[in-house]
Image (cartoon, rainbow, N blue to C red):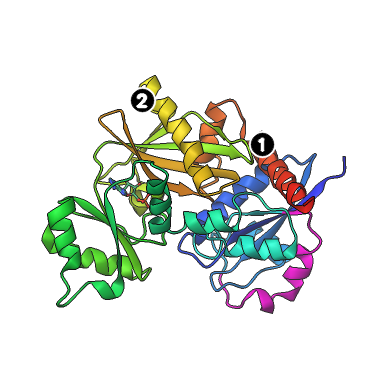
Amino acid sequence: MKRQRVAVIFGGRSGEHEVSVVSARSVMAALDPERWESVPFGVTRGGAWLTPEETARLLNAGGPSFPGHGTLLTSPAALAALGRCDAAFPLVHGTYGEDGTMQGFLELAGLPYAGAGVAASAIGMDKALMKALFREAGIRVPRYAVLRSWETGEGDDRANRYVEEILGYPCFVKPANGGSSVGITRVDSREDLAGAFAAAFAYDDKAVVEEAIAGQEIECSVLGNEYLEASVPGEVVPDRAFYDYDSKYSATSRTQLHIPARLAPAAAEEVRALAVRMFQVMGGEGYARVDFLVRDGHEVVANEVNTIPGFTSISMYPKLWEASGLPYRDLLTRILELAFARHERRAAR
Ligand SMILES: Nc1ncnc2c1ncn2[C@@H]1O[C@H](COP(=O)(O)OP(=O)(O)O)[C@@H](O)[C@H]1O
Ligand SMILES: [Mg+2]
């Protein structure tokens, strides 16, 4: 069988640039060389696309990130190189990568690509949209409200009233568009509420405030197009009040993972069924990591869906498949096969 050329696209303009580079290094090292030839495309922090040669040079030099300004349109050599690929594996986390924009571009380019499509990606990057869809589908979500930046502050006490009359403390304030816990605050008292909104509005004009769910943080991996499968659930035990940026990535983090999660069989089954349901409700295909908060060991509450989750060999998404009997390399092959299958199904219409 002829090897297919896979454009691995990573880095990018989001705060998760470095994480993306690490994910891409792992993916490229693990892709089955009998079937796939990986072609690296680094996207700089400023948004320029590097050619595969430029990207390889920076990767070999050990670069944790790609500096430089520009846009896709100032990178014609990279675009031409992309035109010589058979498929794409987008691994840019967050804005301009995980949010549907990259997927839209790949649709226009006519390339099969790994992971969720345009609409599911966009929904997955908007915590307000995502929660509304889940609630509509009868899936339990924390009580929450959505606020715009111009709806809080001097003389407008809607946020305070909602929190104090409905939610109580502690609560969580998040930018609607975010990731890696950036801009998220756990608020324990009224004094911290205004600061929490200011922190969220530094990233987005739309914020979500929600009740805190005390309990376990459970994650489940899903995979498939028309038929989705769910992995065994895993559990994250952050080493601090919540799973913030440092507990996710810092070298000194003492965050623990339990695979499988410490859940009774019935709760684990509910998590797996809900994970599939949540991705389906978003119209998702390909793969995703679905996150939950579980109260008292049995009350499963939906938190969020990540359409481009961390993808290093020690990240939760591949580890959960590993524990379910699907090794990292085979998982990557499966994800690419799903990309081709979806492309062919849609082209046949
Ligand atoms: N309602 C909640 N109750 C308890 N903890 C929460 C809640 N919302 C968020 N958290 C904590 O904050 C972390 C990040 O929030 P999340 O909504 O997953 O945003 P991100 O997309 O940045 O990962 C979660 O992993 C969890 O530790
Ligand atoms: Mg999360």
Which residue is at the front of the view, 43 or 317?
A: 317
**Above or below, 269 relative to 176:** above
Residue 251, visible in the rendered structure: no
Say which mark, if any, is on residue 191. none
Position of residue 117 in the picture relative to residue 301 (left or right): right
Quarter of the N terminus within the rendering:
top right
Say which mark, if any, is on residue 263. 2
Identify residue type, mark 2. Leu
Q: Residue at x 37, y 68 (%)?
A: 203
Identify residue type, mark 1. Arg
How far apart, in angstroms, are the residues tagged by discs 1 and 2? 28 Å
* Residue segment shown in magenta: 67-87
Q: Quadrant of residue 157?
A: bottom left
Position of residue 203 in the picture relative to residue 340 (left or right): left
Tally of numbered discs: 2
Q: Position of residue 192 (x, y in %)?
A: 16, 62
Residue 39, visible in the rendered structure: yes
**Above or below, 201 relative to 217:** below
